Image (spheres, rainbow, N blue to C red):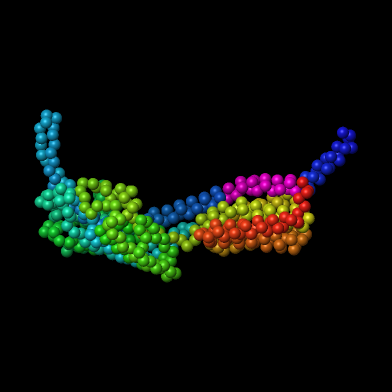
Amino acid sequence: MTTEEQPQQSQGFMHWLKESVTVKLGFIAVLILVLLIPQALVDGLINERASRQEEAIKKVSDQYSGDQLVQGPVLVIPYREQTTETDDTGKKSTGEVIENLFILPNDLHFKGNVYTEILYRGIYKVPVYTSSLNVSGNFTKADLSSLSVDPGKLMPEKAYLVFSISDLKGLKTNPQVSIAGQTLAATPIAGEGLFPNGLQVPVNLYNKYDGPISFSFNLDLKGSQELHFLHLGKTTDVELKGNWPDPSFDGRFLPDTRVVNHEGFNAKWRMLYYNRPFPQQWVHDLGLISNSKKTDDAIFGLKLMLPVDQYQQTTRTSKYAILIILLTFVSLFFTEMIGKQKVHAFNYILIGAAMVIYYTLLLSFSEQIGYNWAYLVASGATVMLIAVFLASVLKNRKAASIFAFILSLFYAFIYVIIQLEDLALLIGSIALFVIIAALMYSSRKINWDKH
């Protein structure tokens, strides 16, 4: 090879690098993969901000009052039980211990209003509520024969009523319980009890145990985000009204009837004991109701959901980043090939950087003005930036305007998918099919022989 041929070959190789469609597509593919690195960092930023929101909610809940679970009431009647023990010599001795008979309500009714408001900690919103609940119902005589308990051993004069709420800090007044013709104040249970954070009311049932025992009391309760109940009655009825327009009914049972509108909600539950994981009465077992598996199968109620969680929406949008970047670069490549106007590789890098920064814009604005407006602002700013940049690079306003229109369609397409959760797969599949068809049609004008 002569010295004159070497520069010619070098120039030919450089010309091939500049003109080769294969090289350009390879560069675009590598750039897309590289852009996934900062995109992953953006996802980490979204998760960090979401964690800060959870910390803010937890702090407000700790200071105001946490999620509330109302459990009970349960009627507890002590009784004497004979025991027999055998020592090492085989000698038997008898003694007496005090055990407890636990009885669940025959009818249990909850009725109340839930007034909700928003508290702020910095930029974060925390829904809290105050509720006025009336709890009423009755107990009927236990079937002692099935429990092998001697009725004569019962101590009804030492009976007591037990109920519980998750966070005692939420009590605004001391509950006054009316039961068996008596009105008594509830007191906290010291030590281990039937419920965590339990309250009890001693009640003298001497000569009153044979008939139905009615009870009623009010709970003036504060809480954050969630209000749940435990299905303990043979029949459990709950009626709740509130001013929160976006309740989420959850747990083991959904309301039988519900009305939800912009003014609030009205929901009613009615459950029978067939679906209750607890017996109507039992003895000895203090931890039966606190069993987490059984409790999970008997809890129901509502959550006060914020209408839009910007972090969930932004996370879902971020998951489509690879699709937006791919479609944008493919569209730019087609614009370059069809218009026969070169776009330098560095310009591709700058446009890719703008599309990654878009997600930080979306995140920061959504914290201040909400997701929908933030999406409009971030998308509009990004499309305008890229359009103006391409117009100056290509010296062709028409091509830049067409590209801006295509990019706007992409962002509108992602927004529609985010909003239509149930139809996201259907709409997304149809839209991608149309995009592929458009790309196939446009590719006819490209000279693929330049390899």
Q: Is 27 part of what is drawn in magenta?
A: yes
The one of 77 and 30 positioned closer to us in this rendering: 30
- The reply, left or right, for residue 105 in relation to residue 373 is left
Instruction: Determine if residue 261 is in view.
Output: yes
- The reply, left or right, for residue 402 in relation to residue 5 is left
Residue at 59%, 59% (x, y): give it: 430
Q: Position of residue 34 (x, y in %)?
A: 64, 46
The one of 170 and 350 positioned closer to us in this rendering: 350
> Outermost residue toward the top?
89
- Quarter of the image where one finds residue 273: bottom left
The one of 310 and 318 positioned closer to us in this rendering: 318
Q: Position of residue 421 (x, y in %)?
A: 51, 59
- The reply, left or right, for residue 42 in relation to residue 308 is right
Compared to 127, does 319 lie above or below?
A: above
Residue at 23%, 46% (x, y): give it: 285
Q: For the N terminus, which image quadrant?
A: top right
Q: Main secondary structure of the magenta part?
A: helix
Total number of numbered discs in the rendering: 0
Residue at 77%, 57% (x, y): give it: 339
The one of 170 and 153 positioned closer to us in this rendering: 153
Q: Which residues are magenta?
A: 21-42
Q: Position of residue 54 (x, y in %)?
A: 46, 53
Instruction: Determine if residue 191 is in view.
Output: no
Q: Is 318 part of what is drawn in magenta?
A: no
Compared to 151, does 420 lie above or below?
A: below
Q: Position of residue 355 (x, y in %)?
A: 64, 54
Residue at 70%, 58% (x, y): give it: 441
- The reply, left or right, for residue 361 in relation to residue 68 is right
